[in-house]
Image: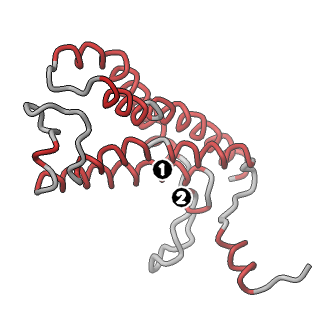
Amino acid sequence: MTSTPASAALAGASDTVPGVSPHLRRLAVLASLTVLPSCLWRLAIAAGIPMGWGPGSDLHHSYYPGRESLVLLLVTLLQECLGLLSLGLVRRWGEELPRWIPGLGGRRFHPLVAVVPAALGALALTGITCLGAATWAEVNAANPDAPTGLALRIFSLSYAPLLLWGPLLGVLTVAYWRRRRIHG
């Protein structure tokens, strides 16, 4: 089978790293996708789509779209970027600086540069999402403007995948640390 320039470019773009199993690559993609449903839910609010919040809530659709939408867009962008960082634990760019950085490009960095923030992030995400899931019923009951019925189900389905983000990030972090200790 002959290689074309396009297939060679795609092979280089895969950014594969020795010692990373296909299973870990799939887990990294899954971890990065856990943020997507909640981000889409937030973008719906920013666009002014009614998502079940009552008129006394800051998330009521009558406030959107508008300047308030910018905050939701920025939070969504931040969350998506953080979610995509999970991929760095299985890709080359999670081990060395990008080549386009003048003077520093291509240099490998110490594994702790990725492990410490990833481990702290995994712990924080797990704690925050579990606490949020455990207390949502109380918060919802105390807030007459919180979503109910179908809107509550949509909210719950949008935020439930976040419960996986922290544990998946933890698994990827441990695997990254082990691999970097073995393979350098």
Viewer-closest of 30 and 167: 30
Viewer-closest of 170 and 97: 170
In the picture, the disc for residue 92 is none
Q: Quadrant of residue 120?
A: top left
Q: Position of residue 94 (x, y in %)?
A: 55, 57
**Residue for point 57% across, 71% down:** 106
Q: Position of residue 125 (x, y in %)?
A: 40, 32
**Residue for point 51% across, 66% down:** 97
Q: Secondary structure at mark 2?
A: loop
In the picture, the disc for residue 113 is 1
**Residue for point 30% across, 51% down:** 43
Amino acid type indicated by mark 1: Val
Amino acid type indicated by mark 2: Phe
Viewer-closest of 26 and 99: 26
| Quarter occupied by the N terminus | bottom right
Q: Position of residue 179 (x, y in %)?
A: 69, 45
* In the rendered image, the vertical position of residue 36 relative to residue 167, given as above or below: below
For the rendered model, the colour scheme is secondary structure
Q: Position of residue 121 (x, y in %)?
A: 42, 37
Left-right relation of 145 to 99: left
* In the rendered image, the vertical position of residue 5 relative to residue 40, given as above or below: below
Q: How many marks?
A: 2
Q: Secondary structure at mark 1?
A: helix
Label 2 crowding class (10 Å Cα cut-off): few <14, some 14-19, many 20+?
Answer: few
**Residue projecting furthest to the bottom:** 5
**Residue projecting furthest to the right:** 1
Asked if the residue under mark 1 is in contact with the one under mark 2, i.e. CB atoms within 8 Å, the reply is yes
| Distance CA(mark 2)–CA(mark 1) | 7 Å
**Residue for point 68% across, 44% down:** 24
Left-right relation of 84 to 180: left
User: What residue is pinned by disc 2?
Assistant: 109
